[in-house]
Amino acid sequence: MITNIILFIHIISAATWVGGGLLLFGMGIYFKDPEVQKTIYSHIGPFYGYFQLIWITLLIITGALLLNQHDLYSLMFTNEFVDSRFGELLYRKLSIVLLVVLATALHMYISLKAHGRERSFKEKILSRLTSMIIFLFNFSIIWYAMNISQYFI
């Protein structure tokens, strides 16, 4: 029962995290006028950043709890686990999660630092790069999660 509750929170958090990213990505495509984009993102950005921080934190916590619920901490560093298909999938997913967390931290740092002023060229490039990394890698994480889930059915 507790595993199902943790998994439910994990899936809701993932849906919210990825869905929010899709919404902002879609807004960037739909609103082509740079002034409209600037207005929208300056108003939505800070709220979205803190909102998403809640969900990525829940994803990390519930992911760690799920590893514990399935007794994977004791197995994760054994040769058999590392060499298994399940281990390979889990390690790939965890690596991409780490990259997304780092990209998110950098993106939030730039966003908070530049809030209320025009971003420098370097900040614009890093901000867009981290946004694309987060956006694209989220789909990889979902792919690996789907493959990993097959081991629990």
Image (cartoon, helix red, strand yellow):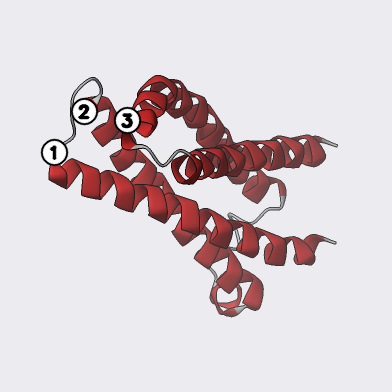
Q: For the residue labelled by badge 3, is the local secondary structure a helix, a strand or a loop?
A: helix
Give, as a three-letter code, the residue at label 3. Answer: Glu
Q: Nearer the viewer, mark 3 or mark 2?
A: 3
As measured in the structure, the alpha-carbon distance from the residue carrying label 1 to the one carrying label 3 is: 17 Å
Quick one: label 3 or label 2, which is nearer the N terminus? Answer: 3
As measured in the structure, the alpha-carbon distance from the residue carrying label 1 to the one carrying label 2 is: 8 Å
As measured in the structure, the alpha-carbon distance from the residue carrying label 3 to the one carrying label 2 is: 17 Å
Q: Position of residue 57 (x, y in %)?
A: 51, 33
- Residue 12 shows in this picture: yes
Q: Can you tell which quarter of the image residue 9 is in?
A: top right
Q: Which residue is mark 1?
A: 120
Q: Which residue is mark 3?
A: 35
Left or right of 8? Residue 87 is: left
The residue under the point 40% across, 20% down is 43
> Dot 3: within a 10 Å radius of its alpha carbon, few (fewer than 14), some, or many (20 or more) residues?
few
Asked whether the beta carbons under mark 1 and mark 2 sit within 8 Å of each other, the answer is yes
Q: Which residue is mark 2?
A: 114
